[in-house]
Image (spheres, grey):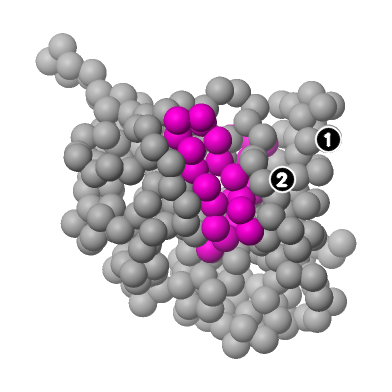
Amino acid sequence: MRVSPMVDPARSRWWAAGTPAEQADELNVLLRDPEVRAIVAHTGGQATIGYLDLIDLDAIRADPKPIIGYSDISVLHMALHAKTGLVGFHADIATHGFGSDWYTLGDEARRSELVDLYTRVLTKAEAPGALPAQEAWETWRPGSARGPLFGGLLNRLVLLRGTPFAPAVERFDGAVFFWEELERPVSRIWNDLHALRLSGVLDRIAGMVVGIPSEVTPHEAGGQRAELRDVVLDVLGRRDIPVLAQVDFGHTSPNLPLPIGVRAHVDADNRTLSLIEPAVVEG
C-alpha cells in the first residue's frame, strides 16, 4: 500500500490539499504507474471538479484501474466513465469507511460479509450476485429492471451537466440510476430531479435506487409535510419504473460497492439489488 504525499493534514489550500494542478498531477502519477492496481480515496473532498480537465485520460484508457470512493469522488466516476468507459466504484473511502466505520458501526459478521463482498467485486471475474442489506430496504414504486448502474451524489451529477464531462443523455438508456444526497432540503432535491427530468434522463432510465439520505430535511409549511419519498414520486409522475430506497450507500457507512457501468438487477418488489456481471476482468 502506498499513501500519496498530499494525504497530509499539514497541507491545506482553502478546502483542498492543493491547487487543481497539484491534485491532478498526483492522480496522474498513480494512473500512469503500472504498480498501482487500485486507487482508494482518502476522503471525498470538495475540489474534484476543478481538475477534471487536467486528468490524463489516455493513461486511463491504456491501463484502467479501479478508483474507489464516494461523495465528490462520484464526480470522477461519472465523468471518467463518460469519457473513457472506466468502471469506477461508488464505495467506501479510506478514512470513514475502511479505516473507521467498518469497525465502529458493524458487528463482526457484517464486517466479514463486507470483506468477502468487496474482495469478490474487486478481484473476481464473476457476477457478485445479490448485495447484502444491513437493514430493510424500501419499495417506493414496485417492479423490477435490469441495466447498467450509473449515478452518484445527486447534486454533483447536476453540477456536471453544464460541462464537457457531463454524461450524454444516451448514457442513461436502460440504466439503473442510483443516487444519494446530504445536507439538502427536499425542495432542493425536487429541483435537481426536475433538472434531470427536463434533460431527458428520467425518460430513459429503467430503474432507480435511492441511497440513505444524510441530513436531508423534509419540507414543513402551512400544515403540509413533504418527505424525500414524496418529492421523488412527485417528479417521476406516471413513469412506470421501479424505485428501491434506503439502500446501504451514501454518506453513511458501511457502503455497498456500486460499480459504474456494470449491469444490475433491481427488484423493488422483493427489495433486492444484484450485480449480474463482473466488475473486473482477470489480467
Query: Dot 1 lies on which element?
Result: helix
User: What segment is highlighted magenta in the picture?
Assistant: 252-277
Q: Residue furthest left?
A: 222
Give the percent coordinates (x, y) of residue 4: 76, 66
The residue shown at (77%, 29%) is 110
Residue 24's x, y, as percent? 59, 75
Q: Is residue 33 above or below residue 82?
A: below
Height in image: 221 above or below 259?
A: above
Residue 146, magenta (yes or no): no
Instruction: Give the position of the N terminus as an image quadrant.
Output: bottom right
Please determine whether, in this image, residue 135 is positioned above or below residue 148. above
Find the distance from the CA under tag 1 to the CA under tag 2: 19 Å
The three-letter amino acid code for the residue at tag 1 is: Ser
Q: For the residue marked with disc 2, what is the amino acid? A: Thr
Few, some or many residues within 10 Å of mark 2 (<14, 14–19, 20+):
some
Q: Nearer the viewer, residue 192 or 131?
A: 131
Q: Is residue 271 magenta?
A: yes
Give the residue pinned by disc 1: 112
Q: Earlier in the sequence, mark 1 or mark 2?
A: 2
Residue 42: x %, y % from top left: 69, 54
Q: Is residue 211 left or right of residue 227?
A: right
Closer to us: 271 or 98: 271
Which mark, by number, is residue 95? 2
Residue closest to the far top: 223
